[in-house]
Image (cartoon, grey):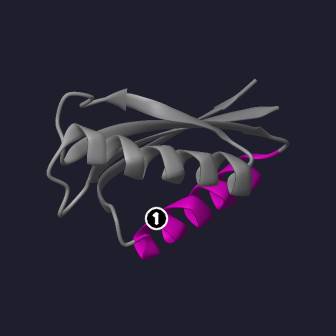
Amino acid sequence: MVVGVLKLDLYLPGNDSLKGKRQVLKGMLERIIREFQVSALEVGDGDLWQRTQLGVVTAGRSRTQVTVKFQELRDWLDKYRQVEVINAEEEIIAL
């Protein structure tokens, strides 16, 4: 079994309140969890209205499977107009 952890630093342009940030994040996280079959949540920058950190975790049978899933997620985020990926850190652990 292989476990992957992806930490994403995101910028939310055009956002002017924490309420607006929560609305964007709620919809985005629900879609990420549903479409990519991962666990995801906000793990940092909770008090900033134009920044956030997301933690995404998944498990798979191979390193390649996890890497491909994370790449598909990053590609999807690049097309998601409400956020910009500032940084992405990936760690994969074979158990």
> Residue 64, can we see it?
no
Question: In the figure, residue 83 lies in which quadrant?
Answer: bottom left
- Residue at 71% x, 47% y is 63
Give percent across and percent down for residue 13: 19, 62
Q: Which segment did they paint magenta?
A: 62-80
Quarter of the picture holding the N terminus: top right
Q: Secondary structure at mark 1?
A: helix
Question: Residue reaching furthest front?
Answer: 19
Give percent across and percent down for residue 54: 42, 38
Question: In the figure, residue 35 lies in which quadrant?
Answer: bottom right
Question: In the figure, residue 18 lies in which quadrant?
Answer: top left
Q: Nearer the viewer, residue 48 or 95?
A: 48
Q: Amino acid at mark 1?
A: Leu
Q: Is residue 62 left or right of residue 66?
A: right
Q: Main secondary structure of the magenta part?
A: helix
Quickly name the residue at label 1. 77
Give percent across and percent down for residue 49: 18, 42
Q: Nearer the viewer, residue 43 or 49?
A: 49
Q: Nearer the viewer, residue 82 or 1?
A: 82
- Residue at 19% x, 28% y is 47
- Residue at 34% x, 65% y is 82
Magenta stretch encompasses residue 66: yes
- In the picture shown, does residue 65 fall above or below 21? below
Quarter of the picture holding the C terminus: top right
> Residue 89, can we see it?
yes
- Residue at 48% x, 44% y is 26
